[in-house]
Image (cartoon, grey):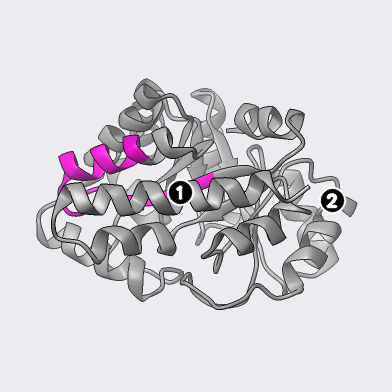
């Protein structure tokens, strides 16, 4: 994913990273949606692994994840989503809570993710203090690891997290769970500035980015703009797959125009 962010930087813009959960409305349909998202203009993909007890997911992502779990999605299905992104031409990272990876087997998960062509993982509920076993497996299989910082993070904590992160640093724009919002506050810009002061070179901002205007605002100061709920919403709102994919492409196009107009 770092290379995709660098490529966007070389074009004087932020990278656009889109999130979709694997398995909604089915594994095959989610893979088609991931490919459509890449074709419409995202630079990288977060493939979400649905989880029954999320701490960060807002109602939109939860609704899709719960439906995917009810329809039998399993950990191994996330690798199909990764392959769909890579085959469409974009790097992919897995967004997952740590427990499913732990239960699947840390080294087994890392090995199969690397085999699928994945670039790394984002682990929202794993802190660097407790990540030694995962980091060892990730290093062994050439995977990036992304940790998160929040507006409440102290400078000392930011510095510690930056030092442990081997992928991009995920800066949460607001406190709270993911979801669509009417506006993006000023905390994210300060957090990006503080992260860079601690040595971060690839800082991506997510949570709450909903519109092309939001993408332009965040893209003016961040290295990457992460969008999830606004994209998942396009699939939830349309039962017909062709209509849903058209809505998804339109939203990605709006966001891509936003990051390209930011600077």
Q: Which residue lies under the disc numbered 2? A: 196
Q: Is residue 182 visible?
A: yes
**Disc 2 vs disc 1: which is toward the camera?**
1
Question: Is 119 rendered above or below residue 72?
Answer: above
In the image, taking residue 64 as reference, residue 120 lies left or right, namely right
Q: Which of the pair 218/127 is nearer the observer?
A: 218
x and y, in percent, of residue 213 in the image: 62, 63
Residue drawn 37% across the image and 26% down it: 88
Cβ atoms at labels 2 and 1 below 8 Å apart: no
CA–CA distance in space, label 2 to label 1? 28 Å
Name the outermost residue toward the left. 71
Q: Which of the pair 14/92 is nearer the observer?
A: 14
Number of marks: 2
x and y, in percent, of residue 190 in the image: 82, 66
Residue stretch in magenta: 17-36
Question: Is 218 rendered above or below residue 132?
Answer: below
x and y, in percent, of residue 176 in the image: 54, 78
Question: Is 212 rendered above or below residue 85?
Answer: below
Check residue 250 for magenta coloring.
Answer: no
2 or 1: tag closer to the N-terminus:
2
Q: Quick one: label 1, few (<14), some, or many (20+) residues within 10 Å?
A: many
Q: Which residue lies under the disc numbered 1? A: 252
Residue drawn 63% across the image and 38% down it: 167
Q: Which of the pair 256/18 is nearer the observer?
A: 256
Q: Quadrant of residue 160?
A: bottom right
**Which mark identifies residue 62?**
none
Q: Is residue 53 visible?
A: no
Residue drawn 35% across the image and 33% down it: 82
């Amino acid at each position: 994913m770092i290379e995709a962010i660098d490529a966007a930087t070389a074009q004087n813009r932020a990278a656009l990273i889109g999130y979709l959960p694997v398995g909604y409305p089915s594994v095959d349909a989610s893979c088609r949606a991931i490919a459509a998202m890449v074709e419409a203009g995202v630079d990288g993909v977060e493939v979400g692994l649905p989880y029954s007890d999320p701490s960060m997911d807002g109602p939109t992502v939860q609704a899709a994840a719960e439906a995917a779990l009810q329809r039998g999605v399993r950990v191994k299905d996330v690798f199909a989503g990764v392959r769909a992104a890579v085959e469409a031409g974009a790097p992919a990272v897995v967004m997952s809570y740590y427990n499913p990876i732990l239960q699947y087997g840390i080294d087994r998960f890392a090995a199969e993710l690397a085999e699928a062509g994945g670039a790394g993982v984002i682990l929202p509920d794993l802190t660097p203090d407790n990540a030694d076993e995962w980091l060892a497996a990730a290093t062994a299989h050439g995977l990036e690891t992304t940790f998160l910082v929040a507006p409440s993070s102290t400078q000392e904590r930011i510095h510690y997290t930056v030092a442990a992160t081997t992928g991009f640093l995920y800066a949460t724009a607001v406190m709270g769970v993911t979801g669509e919002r009417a506006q993006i506050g000023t905390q994210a810009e300060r957090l990006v500035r503080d992260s860079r002061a601690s040595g971060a070179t690839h800082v991506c901002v997510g949570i709450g980015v909903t519109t092309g205007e939001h993408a332009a605002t965040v893209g003016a100061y961040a290295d990457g703009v992460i969008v999830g709920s606004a994209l998942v919403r396009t699939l939830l709102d349309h039962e017909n797959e062709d209509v849903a994919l058209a809505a998804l492409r339109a939203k990605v196009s709006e966001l891509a125009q936003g990051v390209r107009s930011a600077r």
